[in-house]
Image (tube, rainbow, N blue to C red):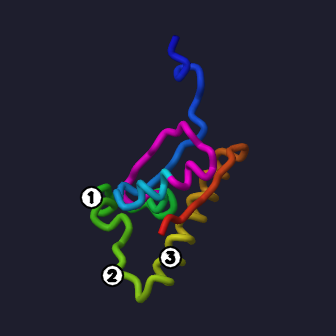
Amino acid sequence: MNTYAHKPPQAIVLSCIDFRFHEKLKDELKKEKINSFDLLCLAGGAKNLASPKPTTKRRLAKAGGGSSQFKNIEKEIKFHQAELKKAENLIKKLFPDLRIKVVLLE
C-alpha cells in the first residue's frame, strides 16, 4: 500500500533555483523537523510572487536582480526581506489558515 498517496507533505517550500541554497534549505527543514515537502523552485523564488514582472523572459533574466544592483550586502538583504514579507502577506491573504514561515538563507 502506498502511504504517501494518503499523507500530504508537511510543507510546501518555495525556493530560488540557485543551487547554493539547497544545502542550507535542507538544514533549515531538518531544524523544523520537516521530513516531507513539495519543493517549488522558481528563478527569484518568492520575489516572483511579491513583485512579478510582465513577461517571463524578463523575470528569468533579472529574477533576483543580481548582487551588482545593490550598494552593499546589507541593502541586498533588506530588499530580499521586504520581498519575502510581500510574498508572505499575499499568501496569508489567499490562504488565511495556512501556517507560513519565511526564512532568508544567506
Amino acid type for the residue under numbered disc 3 = Ile
Residue under pointer 3: 77
- 3 or 1: tag closer to the N-terminus: 1
Residue 88: image tag = none
**Left or right side of 4 for 101:** right
Residue under the point 31% across and 55% down: 56
**Left or right side of 38 for 8:** right
Amino acid type for the residue under numbered disc 2 = Ser
Find out whether residue 29 is within the magenta segment.
yes
Residue 32: x, y in percent? 63, 50
**Left or right side of 57 for 3:** right
Residue 91: x, y in percent? 61, 51
Residue 98, above or below 9: below
Residue 76: x, y in percent? 46, 78
Asked whether the viewer can see residue 54, the reply is no
Give the magenta part as a residue range: 27-45
Residue under pointer 2: 68
- Nearer the observer: mark 3 or 1; the answer is 3
Residue under pointer 1: 57
Residue under the point 53% across and 65% down: 104
Q: Quadrant of residue 78?
A: bottom right
Residue 14: x, y in percent? 49, 51
Secondary structure at badge 3 equals: helix
Mark 1–mark 2 Cα distance, whole angstroms, equals 20 Å
Mark 3–mark 2 Cα distance, whole angstroms, equals 13 Å
Residue under the point 52% across and 54% down: 27
Q: Along the line of sight, which residue is nearer the eye, 32 or 77?
A: 32
